[in-house]
Image: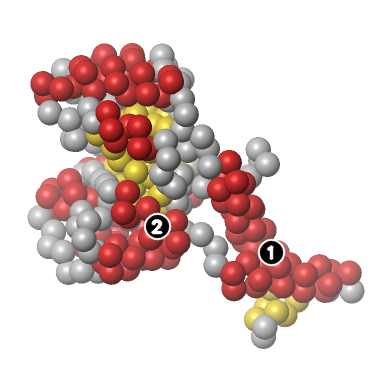
Amino acid sequence: MTDLPRPLRSVLYLPASNARALEKARTLPCDAVILDLEDAVAPAAKEDARRAAVAAVDAGGFGPRLVAIRANGLPTPWSAEDFAAIAGSRADAIVVPKVDTVDQAAAAVAAAGGKPVWAMIESPLAVLNVAAIAATPGVAALVAGTADLAKDLRAQDDGNRTAFLFALSAMVNAARAFGIAVLDGMHPDIADEDGLRRSTAQGAMLGFDGRTLIHPAQIAAANDVYSPGADAIADAHGLIAAHEEAAAQGKAVAVYKGKLVEVLHVAAARRLLALHAAIAARDGEA
């Protein structure tokens, strides 16, 4: 199963300064956790949070969950020690906030000591440079930071994220062009289940791999939206079978449920089935 895509449907931010949250993370049904040293941690608690995050990942017990640590940004006084500590830890990746340029992306990769870098795209400048950031060797994922982006854009929320559509699509296009993962930004209103589901479905429609979250109550919605449904799985099997039958008859294309089926559709169907298998394997390990 090692060649299957790794699910990143639900990626939960947790403050590394909260010992109870770190322990609970080992039991939550999310695909990944980000132990946060940045926004969720007060300046006076930064050093303790760093030690706690490294101790948590080195202690293990997270099962199939991918564990990343978000460092403080490169210009901050905590950055160098954050990067050094994370580089020497068992974290799967280092999340780097406010990566605005390709030079900053390269600096983050150099400081990460071989850890995959998840670059956060949080400003208009970052959006304009997102292709170059995604192309930087060592950058393994893009993470949308829509809260900071909204501030810098002076954007107003219309309930449909209209102001973010250009930026979100640019991130997905850059990630797909360079073969890396891409994660949607968080939904800030924990009580807004309807808004969470609508915006998560929008992100899936745009092509994101999953969503960053700020509360365990949001995990179920992200997992549901980003998991292939029974109808989609059945259609993938049917589409592949129709194409294989046509190929056996010497035909280049097939028809399934009245729609033309070509090789590109078969590739998408096989990827969906591989994702479904990876989710099943992940759930079996939890």
Q: In this view, does 211 lie above or below 203?
A: above
Crowding at dot 2, Cα within 10 Å, few <14 / some 14-19 / many 20+, comes out as some
Label 2 to label 1: alpha-carbon separation:
29 Å
Amino acid beneath label 2: Ala
Residue at horizontal 89%, vertical 69%?
A: 248
**Residue 184: horizontal and vertical position, in percent?**
35, 52
Residue at horizontal 45%, vertical 51%?
A: 9
Say what secondary structure mark 2 lies in.
helix
Amino acid beneath label 1: Val
> Is residue 81 among the parts visible in the rendering?
yes
In this rendered view, identify the residue nearer to me: 263 or 70: 70
> Is residue 106 among the parts visible in the rendering?
no
Quadrant assignment, res 91:
top left
User: Disc 2 vs disc 1: which is toward the camera?
Assistant: 2
Please, which residue is most extreme toward the right here? 249
**Residue 285: horizontal and vertical position, in percent?**
58, 41
Residue, disc 2? 220
| Left or right of 5 on screen, residue 111 | left
Q: Is residue 172 above or below residue 247?
A: above
Residue, disc 1? 266
In this rendered view, identify the residue nearer to me: 108 or 30: 30
